[in-house]
Image (cartoon, coloured by chain):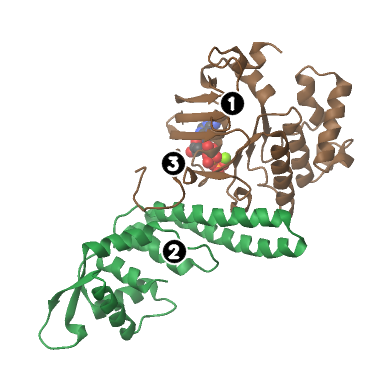
Amino acid sequence: MTSATHPAAGTHESEKPEEDDAAPLLEAVGLRKSFGPTPALAGASVSVRPGEIIALMGPSGSGKSTLLHCLAGILVPDAGVVRYRGTEISALSETRRSALRRSEFGFVFQFGQLVPELSCLENVALPSRLGGMDRRAAERRAREWLDRLEVADLAGKRPGEISGGQGQRVAMARALVTGPRVVFADEPTGALDSLNGEHVMRSLVAAAAETGAAVVLVTHEPRVAAYSDREVVVRDGRTRDLSAEGGATGGAARER
Amino acid sequence: MSIGHTLLGLLEGGPRHGYDLKRAYDERFGQDRPLHYGQVYSTLSRLLRNGLVEVEGVEPGGGPERKRYAITDAGITDVEQWLGTPENPEPYLHNTLYAKVVLALMSGRAATEVLDSQRSAHLRLMRELTRRKAGGDLADQLVCDHALFHLEADLRWLELTAARLDQLAAEVRR
Ligand SMILES: Nc1ncnc2c1ncn2[C@@H]1O[C@H](COP(=O)(O)OP(=O)(O)OP(=O)(O)O)[C@@H](O)[C@H]1O
Ligand SMILES: [Mg+2]
């Protein structure tokens, strides 16, 4: 592995990045982002500790997905910084950010993320293959993860031949197969009924607990958010972290 | 629902007579249950005793209906604390939550504060139920799910209210 695939290893201040539980693993400070004249983020800050599950909540159009994309290095903010293990990822080149995403992050979205021409097994093996792993090893790991998400029997099927809930579990396996330090999940249960949503969330939380991965979860469903350790409310492109303020005491407006 | 706090909240707009207070209350919050005059006067005399309101003027004649009540600084602090403290999450809170949001808007406070702190309190209980569910048998799971769905309904209602705050503010200030 070169320093390009592991940017944190190339920085001076973190020779040996310790997973100090108190220090943030991933952190955004004062993010601003506009699409043309539309401001999507207007001063958003979030801090994610190792292994922590954070729920981003708030009304439609408030900037949750934009914030998630900035945290994950998919989008670059107009102002503000995003740091992953102390490295300012918003300042990295697209090539390095994409290497970082592949090696450190996993992604689950609402739908349509599996490659339709590949079998479920091949889909889940894909991230390892892209990382340079040989086919047999990649497929062995893929099978393990399909098994853990209780969809091993779907290995040979194509995405078009399985249900939405099964598809989400396969997508979850694909997100987790590389052992990411952060899993980004944008409405992962949005297209599922309650029972399937529960299954997907329980699998995600269990896998995250086991591997020590942090999770950044966007959801508008309170029952899904209840799987998080902490919620951050996004409103008009600004964040409000009530749990960080020590819960709900005092009525004075703090951010307005 | 706390009648005392609601009356105090209404008095923040200016001093009122008891009958006037009852009318304002019934109009905004009394859809299901209008107040009795007896309730209004007993509540006002308790607020008076606790120094949260004072009698601002007495018109000639006798009886409680001649008095005009005004909120005191202690009363304002009391309303402030009530609005800033989330309700204990439980199903069917909408009366109290609605009153809090309307009173916050009427007094020019940030109503999103009421919503956000309530969400945080609800989610804390929902997390606990979710954890209990994970460790329980099927019966536990079903019982927890029932509570979770009810709490979720409250929160969805809060979200919807938050999305309509501007509209509600315009109506409340009319
Ligand atoms: N690629 C884009 N081009 C133009 N405008 C965008 C783009 N992405 C987001 N926006 C705008 O930025 C704002 C925030 O969008 P975002 O998708 O982050 O909201 P969200 O909170 O995820 O909403 P939802 O709950 O509906 O998914 C919106 O006004 C949206 O229209
Ligand atoms: Mg979105």
Disc 3, disc 2: CB below 8 Å?
no
What residue would you read off at disc 1? A74
Identify the residue shown where x is 26% and y is 62%: B76
Residue kind at label 1, given as amino acid type: Ile
Along the line of sight, the residue nearer the viewer: A181 or B33: A181
- Please give the label number shown on residue A236: 3
Residue A51: where, in percent of width, then height?
A: 63, 36
Q: CA distance from mark 1 to mark 3?
A: 21 Å
Quarter of the image with the N terminus of chain A is top right
Residue B121 appears in view: yes
Q: Give the drawing colour for chain B.
A: green
Q: Report whether A39 appears left or right of B57.
A: right
Which secondary structure lies at badge 2?
Answer: helix
- What residue sits right under mark 2 in the picture? B97
Q: Are marks 1 and 2 on the same chain?
A: no
- Tell which residue pokes out farthest to the bottom in this image: B62
The residue at label 2 has a CB less than 8 Å from ligand 1: no
In-front residue for pair B102/B90: B90
Q: Is residue B115 left or right of residue B18?
A: right
User: Which residue is drawn at the image coordinates 27% and 77% (left, top)?
Assistant: B44
Residue A94, above or below A123: above
Q: Nearer the viewer, mark 1 or mark 2?
A: 2
Task: Give the chain ID for the brown colour.
Answer: A
Query: Which residue is the extreme one toward the left?
Result: B60
Give the chain of mark 2: B
Q: Are marks 3 and 2 on the same chain?
A: no
Q: Quadrant of residue A135?
A: top right
